[in-house]
Image (cartoon, rainbow, N blue to C red):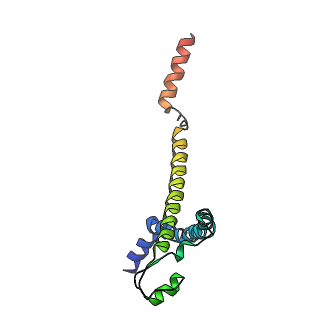
């Protein structure tokens, strides 16, 4: 069983998947920072007053009177549409970046395919027949 497990882990697909997951986790941090530190402040400034979407909520109970989402959740049920909006914008940015990356990779592949293939030398018997033909033509 250990040798089967070792061969399973040693396969390229499993290692590629692990690398992808690790890079994806790091990439998530980058996208979260991009959204929270760059995009959302700009959107907030454009829409008025530099607000943060993450604190936008609708109280679902009359007992909820807190000004921030964290405090409101302690008081009762809330509809936290601002958090959803932030996550949705995160998703759109991530999807756009992945689309651009896939598009760039596809473009590189197309450029590789368009390169003329190096002509392989003809087999030895064809070369010999070509030389014989050339010698006969020169006489």
Where 127 falls versus 65 (above or below)? above
- Choose between 38 and 127: the one closer to the eye: 38
* In this view, 68 is above or below 111: below
The residue nearer to you, when weighing 110 against 44, is 44
Q: Residue furthest top?
A: 139
Q: Residue furthest front?
A: 62
Residue 59, picture quadrant: bottom left
In x, y percent, where is residue 56? 51, 75
Q: Nearer the viewer, residue 58 or 7?
A: 58
Where on the picture, by quarter, is residue 5?
bottom left
- The quarter of the rendered structure image containing the C terminus is top right
Q: Quadrant of the N terminus?
A: bottom left
Coordinates of residue 19 in the picture (x, y in percent): 52, 68
What residue is drawn where x is 49% and y is 74%? 83
- Among all residues in the image, which is located at the extreme left? 1
Q: How many numbered circles does the render carry?
A: 0
Q: Position of residue 99 (x, y in %)?
A: 50, 55
Q: Position of residue 129 (x, y in %)?
A: 49, 23
Foreground residue among 16 and 131:
16
**Residue drawn at 55 percent across, 17 percent down:** 134
Q: Is residue 109 above or below residue 66?
A: above
In percent of the image, x 46 and y 89: which residue is there? 75
Is 80 on the left-hand or right-hand side of 38? left
> In the drawing, does residue 101 fall left or right of residue 77?
right
């Amino acid at each position: 069983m250990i040798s089967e497990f070792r061969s399973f882990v040693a396969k390229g697909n499993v290692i590629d998947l692990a690398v992808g997951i690790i890079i994806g986790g790091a990439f998530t941090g980058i996208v979260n920072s991009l959204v929270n530190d760059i995009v959302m402040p700009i959107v907030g400034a454009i829409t008025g007053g530099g607000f943060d979407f993450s604190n936008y909520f609708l109280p679902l109970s009359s007992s909820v009177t807190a000004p921030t989402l964290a405090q409101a959740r302690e008081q009762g049920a809330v509809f936290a549409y601002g958090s959803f909006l932030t996550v949705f914008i995160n998703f759109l940015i991530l999807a756009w970046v992945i689309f651009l990356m896939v598009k760039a990779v596809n473009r590189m592949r197309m450029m590789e395919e368009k390169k003329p293939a190096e002509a392989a030398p003809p087999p030895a018997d064809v070369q010999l027949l070509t030389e014989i033909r050339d010698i006969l033509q020169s006489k």
